[in-house]
Image (spheres, rainbow, N blue to C red):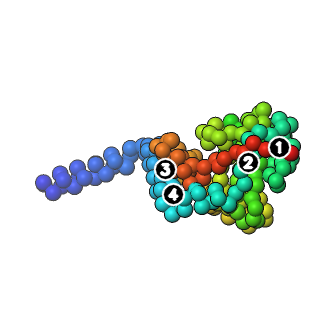
Amino acid sequence: MKFLSVLIFALLLIIHVNSQPIDESNDEEFAQRMKSARALADCKNWHGKEPEASVHLAKILSAPCSIPPTFPPNLKDGWTTDPGCDAKKQPNTCSYHVGAWGCYRHSFKNTGPGAQACYDRKGNWLSDTWQGAGTLDAETALGSIFQQLRHYTADVVPYDNCCKSSGLPQPSTCNLYFEKRPTGICEIKPAV
């Protein structure tokens, strides 16, 4: 009799548990937490393997501190409009540099490193990465599709892992990215 009671109880418990609705929001929340944990681990791993920014900064050109507010397509010394933040396409541009009105890119070599300089609407160089400033690139975004892929892997994916993934402790993880990919410096010189 005792065995039969335990068996019936077990069957009723299984039926009850299986009849309960599944809270899928917990699965989504768990998946988001796992994604954030992975991004944080990838960010810290990338940060630990990257050389100091000075290694790349020594190989790039200083940006002009100001440019004409007309945002010409090219600037002196080979700076070209960044298609990802083109002032002529406002307001549908600059998603990676919110606050910038337009950006330019420069690289001495076709592989990098490269510099990105971003400006406000009046043509003033932005130095604060939290306000839309450009950053150093280990791999230039200029060039062939293969070079753009190298840039994406070396510079964009780490940015996404450190800065864009929700659930990360900001601004500390994003600052890990900006430590290795700072804005560089500007120099007062004729822009065009």
Image coords of residue 80 (percent x, y): 81, 51
Q: Amino acid at mark 4?
A: His
Residue at 62 percent across and 42 percent down: it is: 129
Secondary structure under the numbered disc 4 in the rendered image: helix
Q: Which of the two discs, 2 and 3, labels the residue nearer the N terminus?
A: 3
Q: Is residue 31 above or below residue 69?
A: below
Which disc is residue 47 wearing? 4
Image coords of residue 148 (percent x, y): 73, 61
**Alpha-carbon span between mark 4 and mark 1:** 36 Å
Secondary structure under the numbered disc 1 in the rendered image: loop
**Alpha-carbon span between mark 2 and mark 1:** 11 Å
Number of the front mark, 4 or 1: 1
**Alpha-carbon span between mark 4 and mark 3:** 16 Å
Residue under pointer 1: 190
Residue under pointer 2: 63
Q: Which of the two discs, 1 and 3, labels the residue nearer the N terminus?
A: 3
Residue 113, picture quadrant: bottom right
Q: Are marks 2 and 1 in contact (CB under 8 Å)?
A: no
Which disc is residue 36 wearing? 3
**How packed is label 1: few (under 14 Cα within 10 Å), some, or many (20 or more)?**
few
Image coords of residue 143 (percent x, y): 78, 62
**Alpha-carbon span between mark 1 and mark 3:** 44 Å
**How packed is label 3: few (under 14 Cα within 10 Å), some, or many (20 or more)?**
many
Q: Which of the two discs, 2 and 1, labels the residue nearer the N terminus?
A: 2
Tell me if residue 114 can be seen.
yes
Please identify the quadrant where the N terminus is shown. Answer: bottom left
Number of the front mark, 1 or 3: 1
Residue at 70 percent across and 57 percent down: it is: 60
Q: Which of the two discs, 4 and 1, labels the residue nearer the N terminus?
A: 4
Q: Which of the two discs, 4 and 2, labels the residue nearer the N terminus?
A: 4
Tell me if residue 85 can be seen.
no
Number of the front mark, 2 or 1: 1
